Amino acid sequence: MTDTYYKDRVVLITGGAQGIGLGMAQAFATEGAQVVITDADEEAGKDALKRLQENKLTAAFIPCDISSEQEVVALMKAVGEKYGKLDVLINNAGIADPFTGDLQEMRMSEFDRVLAVNLRGPMLCTKYGFPLLQKAEHPAILNLSSTRAFMSEPNTFAYSASKGGIEALTHSLAVSLTEDRIRVNAIAPGWIETGPWQKESQRYEPRHTKEDKAQHPVGRVGIPADVAEAALFLCSDRAGFITGQHLVVDGGMTVKMIYT
């Protein structure tokens, strides 16, 4: 990529204030995109803008709870009024630390909340962002799935279900939006360390053991930049013949057999 590839292209990143979302915001802004960050955490949003400014990068921040249809409608209206189009929609926002207790202890309200944000949210953003994507020359949607869509630890019912839903939603949208020239793909990250990319009040320095690193054939845990590089490619014209696919970005962890 060059520093002008995304020049004048509008990129909306949900959950863009922290973690993988912030890493993608930094990457697209560096490439010259007009980045719009949306996040339900306003403290994190302000902190993200500060961090970008410190790196001589700019972005806009619009607070939004993507599980709320009313707030998503307002978000897309604001984007439309300011930019008039949307070139790239990145559905990244999600509840990353859901309930992990025993099945009998889980309240259905907790299950419903995870699906409302992780699965319903991307559908809402796609539905109401669609008219703006139609106005772009080469529109693209990128959904953030997870390797948890294909494998699980115990008691991650809601999160795994939501990410499996994202995989299905991705290929369904890809087939449905062909006549509108909108490509739709997904990235399924594995273990991505986000500690240094959290808002200031929750930031921490990671400590990974030799065992942590050894689980990955590449010899390390992932960072947001690893996902961001994949996103830059999939949302670009260089990936013009790719749609309805998912790209696993996990350092090879899901293909390595581990015996205990």
Image (cartoon, helix red, strand yellow):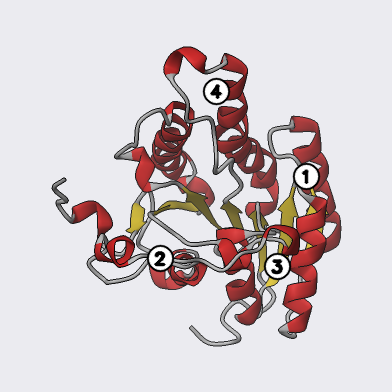
Mark 4 or mark 1, earlier in chain: 1
Within-10-Å neighbours for mark 4: few <14, some 14–19, many 20+: some
In space, the residues marked 3 and 2 are separated at their CA atoms by: 32 Å
User: Mark 4–mark 3 contact, CB under 8 Å?
Assistant: no
Q: Which amino acid does label 2 sit on?
A: His
Where on the picture, by quarter, is residue 175? Answer: top left
Label 4 or label 3, whichever comes before in sequence order:
3
Q: Give the label on residue 111, or none.
A: 4
Residue at image point 86% right, 56% down? 81
Amino acid, disc 1 = Cys
Q: Residue 157 carries which label?
A: none
Secondary element under disc 1, as helix, strand or loop, is loop
Which residue corresponds to the image point at 48% horizontal and 46% vertical from the top-left?
A: 179
- Image-based side of 149 in relation to 92, left or right: left
Query: Tag on residue 208?
Result: 2
Q: How crowded is mark 1: few (under 14 residues within 10 Å), some or many (20 or more)?
A: many
- Whichever of labels 2 and 4 marks the residue nearer the N terminus, that label is 4
State the residue position of label 1: 64
Give the distance between the C-alpha atoms of the residues marked 2 and 4, in whole angstroms.
Answer: 30 Å
Q: In which quarter of the image is the C terminus?
A: top left
Residue that appears at 45% across and 60% down: 192
Relative placement, left or right, of 205 versus 249 is: right
Q: Mark 3 is on which residue type? A: Val
Mark whose residue sits in front, 1 or 2: 2
Of circles 4 and 3, which is in front?
4
Sooner in the amino-acid sequence: mark 1 or mark 2: 1
Which residue is disc 3 drawn over? Answer: 35
